[in-house]
Amino acid sequence: MAHRWTNDLTRDDVTPEHLWLNRRQIIAAGGALGLGSIAAPALAETLEPNTWEEITSYNNYYEFGTGKDDPARNAGALVTSPWSITVDGLVDKPGEYSLADLTSGLSVEERIYRFRCVEAWSMVVPWNGIELADILDRVGVQSGARYVAFETVVQPENMVGVQRRVLDFPYVEGLRLDEARHPLTILATGIYGRPIANQNGAPIRLVVPWKYGFKSIKSIVRISLTADEPPTSWNKANAREYGFYSNVNPNVDHPRWSQATERRIGGGLFSSRQDTLMFNGYEEDVGALYAGMDLGANY
Ligand code: MTE
């Protein structure tokens, strides 16, 4: 893949992903801490992030309409402050937390991740976020918990898509606990070091980079620890087409289209369809989570 050099530190993407993962890069006021010494080697696996403009103008957020440009046009109405998140179920410290209380003191890292929608388009997004595991540790997960369920805010008066009932809202999603605790799984609060845009799921949304984008639920107001697999929005809408796992897998096609390739948004002059990678390129990191599972049956 072409690599564009840049002097902008917050956009420096020369670090291979496994080093990004090992780095707890704190985004201080005024910009990212220096990348310095670990940035030089192994340029083979670099990711070219999409622009802020691309990331914030081509979206799926059905609460604001089903067109790709509807969220950018309509999500300005979303009220994101004050924001609280209810944590309940099998946790030691349930309650309604302010966003600040739930996240304060936890390290915010920059993670440049591939993002692959089930519709076969993709981007690369430089998220700022907190590992979900850190938040789970803060609230104390009880031994009977096996899944984490998430719920998006519903503000009917502000959300034209909710008024039209295009899905059964609130939008809900879920992960197995080991998926939720995986260090790749983050709750994102920013993009490019700026607060996350409303259309991308302000003020806090899930990002699970090895799964189709619809698992990455936006504008979260509830996190529940459960013993049983929680219902998920697209599975409820069409179970044959959308499973609970929804791991990116080029070998398991959607019933209505191939998942072998993807269209990179904003690819520019050299853009073409790219091969989709197993687990969206994160197989080394997450493959063991699914050892022995039939990925065709557990789609
Ligand atoms: N979360 C909510 N609440 N509502 C949605 O419609 N769409 C999902 C996911 N999270 C969606 C959502 C889908 S299908 C995708 S591909 C991603 O958000 C898109 O994220 P992006 O707009 O930041 O690229």
Image (cartoon, rainbow, N blue to C red):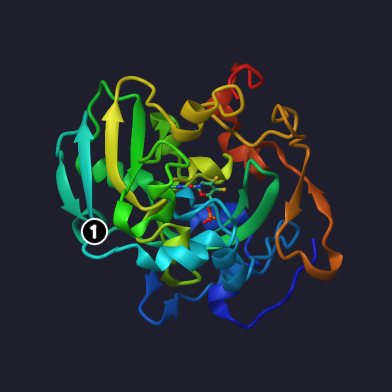
Answer with left or right where residue 140 lies relative to residue 281: left
In the drawing, does residue 214 fall left or right of residue 92? right
In percent of the image, x 60 and y 57: which residue is there? Answer: 68
Work out whether residue 189 or residue 239 is closer to the camera in this orientation and state it: 239
Residue ID at (58%, 66%): 57
Rendered view: 162 above or below 269: above
Tell me if I can see residue 196 in this picture: no
The residue identified by callout 1 is 83
Q: Quadrant of residue 26?
A: bottom left
Estimate the x, y position of residue 17 in percent, counting from the top left.
61, 55
How many neighbours does mark 1 have within 10 angstroms: few (below 14), some (14-19), or many (20 or more)? some
Q: Is residue 243 visible?
A: yes
Task: Name the kind of residue labelled 1 in the image.
Answer: Trp
| SS assignment at label 1 | loop
Q: Quadrant of the C terminus?
A: top right
Quarter of the image with the N terminus is bottom right
Instruction: Work out whether 22 lies above or below 228.
Output: below
Q: Position of residue 157 (x, y in %)?
A: 30, 56
